[in-house]
Image (tube, coloured by chain):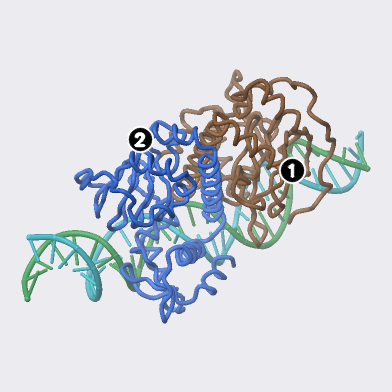
Chain colours: A brown, B blue, C green, D cyan
Amino acid sequence: MSKRPKKSSAEQPTSGLPLGLNQIPLLKILSAQDRQQVLGEMTETHYGKGQYIFREGDPTEYFHIVKEGSVKCVKSSLDGKECTLKVLMPGDLFCCDASAFDGASHPGTAQPMGDVSVLRMKKEAYFKMLRGNPDAAMEVIRYLGNRLNEAQEKAKILALDRADQRLASLLASLAERTGVQEPNGIRLSVRLTRQDMANMVGVTTETAIRIMARFKKDRLVSGTAARLVIRDLARLKHLAST
Amino acid sequence: MSKRPKKSSAEQPTSGLPLGLNQIPLLKILSAQDRQQVLGEMTETHYGKGQYIFREGDPTEYFHIVKEGSVKCVKSSLDGKECTLKVLMPGDLFCCDASAFDGASHPGTAQPMGDVSVLRMKKEAYFKMLRGNPDAAMEVIRYLGNRLNEAQEKAKILALDRADQRLASLLASLAERTGVQEPNGIRLSVRLTRQDMANMVGVTTETAIRIMARFKKDRLVSGTAARLVIRDLARLKHLAST
DNA sequence: AATAAAACATGACAATTGTCATGTTTTTAA
DNA sequence: TTAAAAACATGACAATTGTCATGTTTTATT
């Protein structure tokens, strides 16, 4: 089911203050001095299609932050079926999925969606920093609480909703998180194939295709992977809760 | 769908050092002095059948710890369907479900399963304590990371597995978390109706009943709600991953 | 102990979703 | 710019799960 291509690629120490880095919630609460310190210990790595940032079962040595692009967090079952738990956006923490805080090995695989840039830091160093920074620790607690909420909301949707409703929820939330307003609707800034969607809502690819075909006919969405446009967010959200 | 019975019941300040309280992971890392302080600010409340500890949408003023018994954390959809996200055992934190760390209102309802005893403390007081106790804060981070893992594992199971596999997973994990060894198997120490199980794995009550009937025929389990026994944990676990 | 209320059970049937097979279109890479 | 590979598409059919109806058994309550 899964090929295993080359591991990583270009690595380089984080140069000074890369643009936008102070906006990352989990870093911006730090004092200028601490932030400088943390950035000094971080390494920036780029990943592209077909690569892995880490794989399920790997030991959790680092904690990561998405800098640019999006990363998906995936779990797979013994018979090769895959399930995408979450799409991480710039600023998001993952390890994976923020779970290195507890365990010794990654419970899931982290894959880039297109080209991404990721910051990483030795787990121990990060923990040490948190221990000395109550504000940062509280921010992480808040962040994890939020992520737990999301995960439970997702479980609820998987448990109670039909396939088309789950897909509608997914598209609506992506539109709100990553959407770019356009003349004829909201374009998603992540490349999303029908297969990707299927993995995110727990259905087969064929089912995702059929449902998307219906959505298209009903003028709720248009386009495919490279250019997916949400044409009627309101109606999509309504469908999600019907 | 849901009746709304009387709110709470007997309240009393926590007397001295109630037995077993020092074993609670989130309290035992505190210094004796801090623990004393925290316990002084906690209130113990008892709840029984048909009551609510708090309801979805209520403001999150407190954070809670289960002292005795078990508590279930439930979300419901507009059309009245319910989904049980997690069964909390003594020592578990909930707010609900540990999510008060982020939000302003409870994303789910907390209900006692049978008679329970719950400790609670003003959210602000707890946060203040955490800010001054790096060890406690790190423990909470670890705890939340663990909970996030669990929630994602649950999402994976809901997304990829069949109803019978999900039910097998549930029974296996409950057997390991709350089971009591007995001559002919492992008895679950929580009362669990077919309906409860159905809500936990995202199926209808009828489906849960049918699957349990099959499990019974195959000598994997025996008994009903009040006295549910897992007779063949190994085979149940195997079925869960087939 | 009697009665009411949950919980458990089962059948018939419908709706949803998966499986497999096959073909077209679009995107990617040589 | 061409092959090759993904992605998209659709039909026929099977498997899974839900719905509704109805009845029995067990458990609570007075």
Residue identifier under label 2: B122
Mark yes or no: residue A181 visible. yes
Q: Amino acid at mark 1?
A: Ile
For the point 43% across and 52% down, which residue is it? B24
For the point 54% across and 35% down, which residue is it? A143
Secondary-structure class at tag 1: loop
In three-dimensional space, the C-alpha distance between marks 1 and 2, rounded to whole angstroms, equals 41 Å
The disc placed on residue B165 is: none
The disc placed on residue A53 is: 1
In the rendered image, the quadrant that contains the C terminus of chain A is top left
For the point 31% across and 68% down, which residue is it? B226
Secondary-structure class at tag 2: strand
Of residue B76 and residue A171, the one placed in the foreground of this image is: B76
Q: Quadrant of residue B69?
A: bottom left
Mark yes or no: residue A168 visible. no
For the point 73% across and 34% down, which residue is it? A118
Between circles 1 and 2, the one closer to the viewer is: 2
Q: Give coordinates of residue A209: x percent, y percent.
A: 61, 44
The mark total stands at 2
Q: Quick one: label 1, few (<14), some, or many (20+) residues within 10 Å?
A: many
Of residue A2 and residue A233, the one placed in the foreground of this image is: A2
In the rendered image, the quadrant that contains the N terminus of chain A is bottom right
Q: Quadrant of residue B42?
A: top left
Outermost residue, bottom side: B183
Query: Image check: B41 left or right of B166?
Result: left
User: Please, is residue D29 above or below residue B148 in the view?
Assistant: below
Q: Chain of mark 1?
A: A
